[in-house]
Image (spheres, coloured by chain):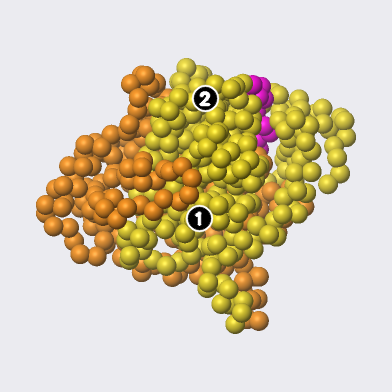
Chain colours: A orange, B yellow
Amino acid sequence: MSDLSFPKLLAGLVRIISAKPRVPRALHDNPSLATILNRRSIRQFTAEPIAPQIWETILEAGRLAPSTVNLQTWSFAHFTGEQWRDFFGSPIPFQASHGVVILADTHRVRSTLPEFPDAPLSEYTMGVMNASLAAMNMVQAAEAVGLGSVMLSETGRTGFYDAAHLAEILELPRGVVPIMSIVFGHTRAKSPVMPPKLPLEAVAFTGRYLETPAEVRDNWRDQMRAGYQVTHGGEKFSAKIAYYNRRIADTERDLRRLILGKEESKKETG
Amino acid sequence: MSDLSFPKLLAGLVRIISAKPRVPRALHDNPSLATILNRRSIRQFTAEPIAPQIWETILEAGRLAPSTVNLQTWSFAHFTGEQWRDFFGSPIPFQASHGVVILADTHRVRSTLPEFPDAPLSEYTMGVMNASLAAMNMVQAAEAVGLGSVMLSETGRTGFYDAAHLAEILELPRGVVPIMSIVFGHTRAKSPVMPPKLPLEAVAFTGRYLETPAEVRDNWRDQMRAGYQVTHGGEKFSAKIAYYNRRIADTERDLRRLILGKEESKKETG
């Protein structure tokens, strides 16, 4: 990917800075809605730890999330910063106060309901979906009590890119797959801008699938490149995508083994 | 699965009715937190429609959800009740005011960033994860403005059990997979009880994976059986699981084709 020209970088930044949630005037004073719409990913925390009771409330928000047929196909491996360092042998990302590895977990429900169907991709879909609902609830609960957080897909080997590595360390049984980590803390510096979001017209439509017009996609790409440098301390978006590309073959092989397991291996040998 | 004895049904119901979110006293007055923790799945709506501006705010909460590297791998096919009936040829579930089919969508990002890696399971993981985050944000935004909603995995052929059916009707390109529908409206009757949730100690742990003790699992199973009958108008939990079991082989085959696609077919023929 070629890098951005300076005018495009500037134009991208202007668009980003002027972007705001669209909320009707009647809802401007709704504190719960403001919490949800103004959430930002936080990557700088103060040294102040989260109080244990507050931390438990955040986990509680995960526990109380909705799930397919209320099957609660999730587990939360959670740590203080110190516990994280002891357990993983590396510091918690962004010097956060607490962190949690979100696990898509259909192992428990299978142990509980032996008649639960054996269908790896359906099961995985349910697991990832429900665990993500719990993850979003935790992040919004943190916002609600004035804390910050960021969801991680690979930083510090904490997300689904390192599912196999995490599965080994956490000694996960079959049917439990790590999908992301979230770290939490007292917000030190809140990013003033919203990262570049696609316009609502591009992602929401009535009826058949709507292809996003090329112009909208080009605009978004330029904003993504510009915005990434700002929110990630100068790191280039193209470098991030290239990094992902280098690692994806390994991740894909690991996920195939973790999710499709024996069945798939048999097919490959047979 | 055998049905519940009356004493077990009763014991399960008592445990369900006495269950409440655990929140420290200092946070009892936090309205945003209360919104998140007190959300319930709503299956009864009044005839009053959701105002268009409010509906757009709910979609906006989906648009502003976090996502892996801000890639926003989601799309929202949304409908009023009337549009739903016209498009799908069947009434919107629970006579809701509006509905949205949540799509895990990596098609758009692939069209925008040609260097996006080709790795079906990783891509699907990212798609389902991010689309679920958006879904949870929408549901919480609805709560925040006093509306109710319910996420559907199969009711009325609206969830991932009917991914292939929905993909055909919505004319979805490769890389776009329907994972759930959500219907929204003005709440008519809020379920007084929380459906039976696993205790926090069973789903959250520090360090290695913690197997849920058999006693906790047995308790939960009894509560699930009892609770399901209450929240689903007498429908038996065992009947629901049996229904899922009958359909799962088809769903699995469809997901395999939708997600793994050509690659997998080649392997099967070769």
Q: Position of residue A258 (x, y in %)?
A: 57, 64
Write down the chain letter for disc 2: B
Q: Is residue B45 visible?
A: yes
Q: Residue at x 50, y 63 (%)?
A: B121
Q: Extreme left residue here?
A: A7
Q: Residue at x 43, y 39 (%)?
A: B62
Looking at the image, residue A194 lies above or below residue A227: above
Q: Position of residue A250 (x, y in %)?
A: 45, 69
The count of marks equals: 2
User: Which image quarter: residue A63?
Assistant: top right
Q: Residue at x 29, y 55 (%)?
A: A214
Q: Amino acid at mark 1?
A: Glu
In the image, residue B201 lies in the stretch drawn in magenta: yes
Q: Position of residue B202 (x, y in %)?
A: 64, 41
Looking at the image, residue B35 lies above or below residue A74: above
Q: Position of residue B46 (x, y in %)?
A: 60, 22
Q: Residue at x 54, y 59 (%)?
A: A167
Write down the chain letter for disc 1: B
Q: Is residue A100 visible?
A: no
| Camera-side residue of A255 and A76 | A255
Where is mark 2, residue-wise?
B49
Q: Amino acid at mark 2?
A: Pro
Where is mark 1, residue-wise?
B171
